[in-house]
Amino acid sequence: MRVSRADAGFQQWEALLRNRNKRQRARAFLVQGVRPINLAHEHGWRLPTLIYDAERPLSTWARAMLRRAEGDTVAMAPHLLRRLSDKEQEVPELVAVADMPADDLSRITVAPSFLGVAFDRPALPGNIGTLLRSVDAFGGAGTIITGHAADPYDPKAVRASTGSLFALPTVRTPSPHQVLAWRDALHAEGRRFTVIGTDENGTHDIADLDLTTPTLLVIGNETSGLSAAWRTGCDLIARIPIGGAASSLNAASAATVALYEAARQRRRSG
């Protein structure tokens, strides 16, 4: 297929970049960059469409991806391909359309080494992407986004994750209640884990807690912190001691510190 004008098909792809509601209705989003597209392919994400620059000599990588394509391949005029980029000055060599997986908590495996993160009502897609990257880096099993929140499939979140979105499950739930019901069901099966919230007024220092056991860390909204439902549902509330003039840590930074502490304890315990 070749696309040289902004026809109806092009407008549908452009909407995936800019319109959250249309992404959700289509259950699809756009992916750019060598590493994210490679990881999406390696982890079995369905890529129904690959769009490439019709006028540029393609790299060896891009040609190989197109040969492996299981769906449609589209040659697109560069002035249109630039409109599908989340960086206005660049014409991407290749853009993939990816299908969204189901928002099903069963996608997250709760094993004896379980370490997961729930992010409560994150407001910024970049913070979601940064957190996904940290969960991946420190051995997490998955991420849960709860409540009215930014979109993990927003291009800013996808880019900030540098491909980690595709390596681990990310599941959205309308509120903490679905997560707590999932926890209770797993506990009834004997698969227990501790739910630890993070808050500047927590009653325990994060380093004083045993994070070597199965754990779900809960990170609050960037402005208002943990919701009342999460405060009630957590087993413990931990603080990260800080100094200096800073009044608090960025939410994704706080998650990274907590995840690092869990990974450090687990390495030391063998």
Image: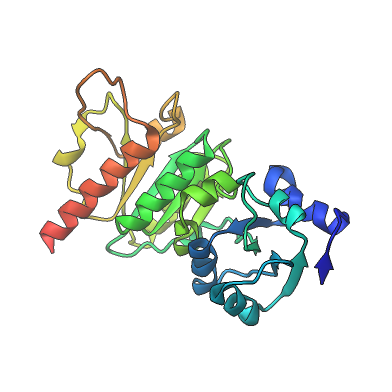
Relative height, residue 141 to residue 147 (above, below): below
Judge left or right: residue 100 versus residue 38.
right
Q: Please count the marks in the image.
A: 0
Q: Is residue 220 in sight in this rendering?
A: yes
- Given residues 199 and 91, the one toward you in this image is 91
Q: Quadrant of the C terminus?
A: bottom left
User: Looking at the picture, how far across and down is residue 104, in whole percent?
Assistant: 55, 58
**What residue is drawn where x is 51% and y is 61%?**
36
Residue 233: image location, x then y, percent = 39, 37
**What residue do we see at 47% from left, 43% from top?**
128
Q: Where is residue 56, by image quadrant?
A: bottom right
Q: Quadrant of residue 224?
A: top left
> Percent from the top left, x then y, of residue 172?
55, 48
With 201 as the anchor, is 231 left or right in this view?
A: right
State which quadrant residue 54 falls in. bottom right
Q: Is residue 187 visible?
A: no
Q: From the image, which quarter does the N terminus lie in?
A: bottom right
The x, y position of residue 261, in whole percent, is: 21, 46
Q: At x 30% / y 39%, what residue is drawn?
A: 235
In the image, farthest residue toward the top = 245
User: Residue sitting at 57 percent across and 72 percent down?
Assistant: 59
Display coloring: rainbow
Q: Nearer the viewer, residue 173 or 168?
A: 168
Q: Is residue 249 above or below residue 233?
A: above
Nearer to me, 239 or 14:
14
Q: Going by the picture, which residue comes out furthest to the bottom?
A: 67
